[in-house]
Image (cartoon, helix red, strand yellow):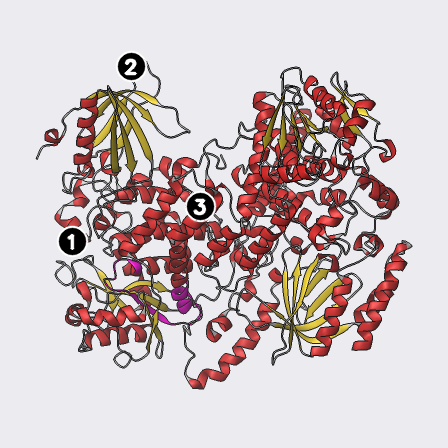
Amino acid sequence: MISQLGILVRYQLRAGQSVGSLEPWSAEKYTLLLEGVKVENVRLVDRISSKKAALGTLYLTATHVIFVENAPDTRKETWILHSQISTIEKQATAATGCPLLIRCKNFQLLQLIIPQERDCHDVYISLIRLARPVKYEELYCFSFNPKLDKEEREQGWMLIDLSEEYKRMGLPNNYWQLSDVNRDYRVCDSYPTELYVPKSATAHIIVGSSKFRSRRRFPALSYYYRDNHASICRSSQPLSGFSARCLEDEQMLQAIRKANPGSDFIYVVDTRPKLNAMANRAAGKGYENEDNYSNIKFQFIGIENIHVMRNSLQKMLEVCELKSPSMSDFLWGLENSGWLRHIKAIMDAGIFIAKAVSEEGVSVLVHCSDGWDRTAQVCSVASLLLDPHYRTLKGFMVLIEKDWISFGHKFNHRYGNLDGDPKEISPVIDQFIECVWQLMEQFPCAFEFNERFLIHIQHHIYSCQFGNFLCNSQKERQELKIQERTYSLWAHLWKNRADYMNPLFRDDHSQTRGTLRLPTTPCNFLYKFWSGMYNRFEKGLQPRQSVTDYLMAVKEETQQLEEEREALEERLEKIQKVQLNHTKVKAKQSEPSKHSGFSTSDNSTANTPQDYSGNMKSFPSRSPSQGDEDSALILTQDNLKSSDPDLSANSDQESGVEDLSCRSPSGGECAPSEDSGKDRDSDEAVFLTA
Amino acid sequence: MEFSDLIRTGRAQAKLLRGPEAPPLRGTLCLTGHHLLLSPGPQATSELWLLLLRSVDSIEKRVASDSGTITLRCKDLRVLQLEIEGVEASLDIARSIEALSSLESVITSFPFFYRPKGLRLGDAWHFHPPERYYKRVARETNAWRLSEVNEDFSVCPSYPRAVIVPRSVDDGALARSARFRQGGRFPVLSYHHAPSGTVLVRSSQPLTGPQKRRCAEDEELLRAVLLGARPGARGFIVDTRSSQAAKQARMTGGGTEAKAAYPGWKRLHRPLERGQPLQESFVRLVEACGDLQQSTDSWLRRLEGCCWLAHVKEALSTACLAAQGMEREGACILVHGAEGTDSTLLVTSLAQLILDPLSRTMAGFQELVEREWIQAGHPFQLRCAHSAFSHARSKHEAPTFLLFLDCVWQLGRQFPLSLEFGEGLLLALFEHAYASPFGTFLCNSEKERCLCEVRTRTHSLWSGLNQPKERRKLRNPLYAPNPLAIWPSVELQSLRLWQGDPLPQLLPWGAS
């Protein structure tokens, strides 16, 4: 076993090289790995229900950890991408074996028990290496091949076009122009090359301003609000220290103000807590002094830094992991994590900016320290509130492309795609995605996409299966030739858009047109714990019936019937014409319609009771004579349960997405639900063993 | 007593504030024996505004130099503000509202005067007679019969006239069993689960007392329950108190079934909160919801502090346990606590909702509420006299019924296609249980309702709700009949605060 695993690690290193030369995985190599490295008799522990662990075989491949259950009828598979692995924990060996805990970045938690300590150690060592690639070429997207030809791949990359997006905003116009000052990344290497700046800002002003800003991230346009010329601009902090000034930077802000003739001042929003910003002054950075800039209004909005956010998420996930906590433990822990408070802070900042732009007609310049984390969150939340386009499927992709990818959000560092400084890791875009979900909860009809769309985007930010989120900047991506060597997630999502539609979406409703208006009265229970994200692999916790899928099916059925009606009407017309032509009419029966009947998925609700009895021995076992029968029952029921596709995490290797399986209803028939009727009785075992 | 004695000033000019979402209303305020009216004047387009005085939970007055402000906190958790011209007038009106909203007499209450168009008195009392269900069970099982031992309410004052009991037990034995149970609530059938042939039975605690008394007829009754299911069937007694509390109850004459006396039955203790602590939990929840100034963090701390969601979780999991025992174990279940009129009904009614697809229909759910809450003797008048705002605390109030509605809402959230009714019906039941123009939730038992002639002199809520116009509003448009049991998740992450409940006026962003 050891030698085999050793081979694997070496093989993996070679694999890194081989995929570097753009050689797709051959089937032989794949099977070789699959057969070469496996550990048998591994048990996968189900954390939520007290069901018996599933017995199976663990495989390690160059890209995945795969667990295949032994249950002969189903052979349920769980696939985990190496890039999803966040931490691996080897726990103290027990009598039953050596437990290995794998925590994933998409919030999946896998507890394996490996019989031999030695094997466990080998798997542990291998996974540590596999989960932390050191070169981009080792990432899955370079070997992932969805069997598209070159042309299709190129088209996929062209689906989202930012220059189109600026055109849609109404640019260029009398106030804003496209600047080539950053051609070849000459001014700022973390900015894109195409940027919109005020017309009155000359190259001299821009370059001068960039020298006065952290990492030379000068003020540039993020969003232009066509209705009243107000805009949202973004930058990094000024290098003001205690007293430094920069004429060009002052002129730059002046130019932004002049680009909005409707207002005689601009807001400068610093998204940091005031204390942090002040501390930065000692390091020669800091924030704008209102006295030095004419006509600005300066505003702090305290969003904590990436380290606080990382710890907050960590604390919240610990709460989610608690084994049967009390309601008080749960709420207490959730509150102590501060997570929802941070979400609210980001939302509040976005709401402030959206209001300034749409209601006051005042332009806003947003920055934090480097202007690539909090600034990205806040600008994108504000844009989402302001512009219904970003609330559509394609618009949302554009928004992420614009405010995150093009403006140099450090995906590689924040999400730990390559082995790096753990202090750089932070759930920055996760928080933005959660903000969107919180908005969707409050405005159920305002978004064209559904929760699944958000969850899949989150998954792929970490999966490294597509090239979109690689690297830390546009420049790095260009150097790596990402577009030539990998595929675009947006094309993949667009192709499967039927799965991501929100059936309640109405773009013509007074509530959903224009700017989304949140209630003026503060209200705390607006922000909820998102169990659909953080507990999404514990299917038992999720609502058992999906309103979204049901409505989509109804919609599809309606559409089919509509089409059928039209076809029949056409036919009727023809028949009538024929009747007119031939005065003698033969009555002719039209064929019975053959639309597929719409079944309301009766079985979709089949589910099993969980362990309601707590730790109490609730229903004590039956009389001794029945004892044998009971244990037999436990075994069979357990096998049944393991066949349950609802927990199959990642059976779709192509997409790497776990719960796509059998969701989308087609042809007016509801797909079989996740819980199939057959395991209706499977939890009896729980009952008896409780 | 005449209402007019209590009305000092019947009329004043006033402005009504109904929260941030609705515009203020200006006009003439009138006070009648049962209502507060605001008439916006002849030229105004908006219609008359009407508030049932009975629904006022607390009243707060503040006076300025020439006007007064009255804040009315209603039992359905609405908060209204009235600005009244004239200090004297406003004080008078406040005092009158106070007096009129807390009248004790049932027969002078509004349902006895309410005569809506389109409804005929006495029509709808036959919408959901429990006898119909009992007769069906008796017919289907052949092991149960309808008994009229309680025809004159002498055996058990809180039971209805007709109850369903094992066929093999005669009325004399029932009467003796009743003497062995608190309040005379001897074991009766609550639900028959046809797929497994098992039954859900409820009662009050046995009066074993410190001497551990026994009652042969009571034991015989429970034996007959098991025999009726199938020979050799097992039974579980779900006691809604902790085993400690059940033991302590012996000192005051109560207690719990001794193992030896009831072969085939096993006891499980699932303590559920009720009475005063539950009411306090409710009060604290509403306080926390009403305080809008706090940060997100202290909100969660206060939500935790009030324990409401913990009660929801406990109630649901106990009901699931009972349901699981019937469906999966093929066992009969007897549920009782002390009096058997609160937690007991919570568990039996939720268990039926989980198991029985019929009870998840519009008519079935109404029938369930009628049979398992109203007829089963949940003392609505005592429990729902005051809601969360009242300062007048008597020890009888408890939002057990609201807890039930909350649990139903949780079921509906987890199974959005399986209930035929929507949140609207639950909110309507909540509102009407606390204050209603209909007679359905009046009094504490069937006996009292008979004395007050509620059936013949008031209208039934069911007839009100089942008018086609109302019905449409209460329906769940996504309903698709689901023939299976619905097993909810009771994990913390699965439960949510029911927002429609604490602050209905803060729900303007729903899907519309």
Q: Alpha-carbon distance for marks 3 and 2?
A: 45 Å
* Precedes in sequence: disc 2 or disc 1: 2
Who's the residue at 78% across and 35% down the image?
A191
Q: Which quadrant is the N terminus of chain B positioned in?
A: top left
Residue where numbered disc 1 is placed: B447
Extreme-bottom residue of the structure? A625
Residue where numbered disc 2 is placed: B42
Name the amino acid, label 2.
Answer: Pro
The secondary structure type at the circle numbered 3 is helix
Residue where numbered disc 3 is placed: B299
Percent coordinates x, y for residue A329 in the rendering: 46, 58
Circle nearer the viewer, 2 or 1: 2
Residue A235 on the magenta segment: no
The secondary structure type at the circle numbered 2 is loop
Which of A47/B425 is in front? Answer: A47
Q: What is the magenta range?
A: B320-343
Which of B339/A628 is in front? Answer: B339
Q: Alpha-carbon distance for marks 1 and 3?
A: 44 Å
